[in-house]
Image (cartoon, rainbow, N blue to C red):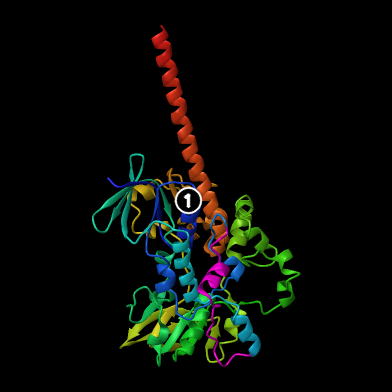
Amino acid sequence: MDTCDVAVLGAGPYGLSVAAHLRESNLDFRVLGEPMSFWERQMPAGMLLRSPRVASHISDPRGRFTLDEYETAKGSPFVVKVPHAVTDFIRQEMARKIPLQDFVNYGKWFLREADLPIESRVVSRVDVASGGFQLHFDDGKSLRAGRVIIAAGIAPFARTPQPFAHLPASLVSHTSHHNDLSKFRGKEVVVIGGGQSALESAVLLDEAGARVEVLIREPRVRWLGTKRRWTHSKVVAPMLYGRADVGPAGVSLLVQRPNLFRRLPRAVQDWWGPRAIRPAASWWVKARTANVRIHTSRFVVHARPLGERVLLELNDGSERVFDHVLVGTGYQVDIAQYPFLSALVLERIERVGGYPLLDEGFETSLAGLHFVGAPAAWSFGPLMRFVAGTEFASPAVARRILHARQRRTQVTLNATIRKGTWATTRTNV
């Protein structure tokens, strides 16, 4: 039977980062999945990473495989396609961002440079087995692993509000269902949501030739960086914000330190955690919304097909008809939505609201099973939802696994010594 010490499920930023840290430990491990597939296939072309460059490096043990090193290796800087309608200032600021395709290419470069053992195979089921776990593949084969690290991303967690749940995919879809928005050229599209994903998708739709409106439940749009710009100056920012720039001033510094954040009283975590990631969009997105009609304090109470279009009844009593509804209402973590986790595995994982409870080594109540990325956010805070979280999560997981191996080796050695002493005593007798 095919075996390994550790199986890493997922080859996005977290899976690649954890694998790079395991590479230093001389463990027999496998990375299972398509490299950067979610980013490449389920994020809209033309998207820019909201996180600053300094917070977008995929962590490796020696800090060798950074975005800067990748940019040097490819021999040319990242090129951002900037709409003609924006000001020179916006153009300069957007040019500092990381384009989606460059980030995808960076992840694949990271994989090659770190020399990670990857298998582009689909895991259909993970079961508990003697001494660890049994992984079943869709080709009928299987793999026995002592430990499993789930780095499978957020795709199964895409949230669609109830009014749209019964509509066909031809009329409603989630922002994560599209890579190419040009298919909506000439169409009337309504985007639901007030966060980065919704509003950036709206401007990308507009730039692709669609007629776009946005419905936002909140009374206003939260545009990041439009007020008190001085707080983000080079001198002041380090005193108020973590490098990942996640959360409001002050709170951002706590979010940047997951080991500290997890030690805060639960009530404090539950108060500040959601506020650090509440729906908001970058100011450089706002600069591109001139042709996008944004309606605040509006939400859909009922939706139904109307021929090949969709009719929406809004909370103000009005009715609107569109060709398509694009939902940008984020993701709701629930690890039960991972289709490969068996019922027995789920039964043995202690959970809170869909999140697994994790210890300091990102290990669940089911020994040997770890989660990284967004599912770790309940235990370690909002930073786990961002690439910047790899800097904390990956070494923590690697340390736990290495220490566990050392303990196991010591136990075996002690048992051998005791057995040898007993045998020697018997012989002398």
Residue at 39% in and 84% down: 324
Q: Quadrant of residue 59?
A: bottom right
Q: Residue at x 48, y 55 (%)?
A: 20
Q: Which residue is denoted by mark 1 in the rendering? A: 22
Q: Residue furthest right?
A: 235
Which residue is more in the foreground, 4 or 85?
A: 4
Q: State whether residue 294 is above or below residue 35.
A: below
Q: How many marks?
A: 1
- Pick whichever, 309 or 109, lies toward us: 109
* Amino acid under disc 1: Leu
- The C terminus: image quadrant: top left
Q: Which residues are magenta?
A: 63-87
For disc 1, the neighbor class at 10 Å (few under 14, some 14 to 19, many from 20) is many
- Give the vertical position of 116 relative to 416 (above or below): below
Q: Position of residue 12 (x, y in %)?
A: 45, 63
Is residue 282 toward the left or the right of residue 10 in the image?
right
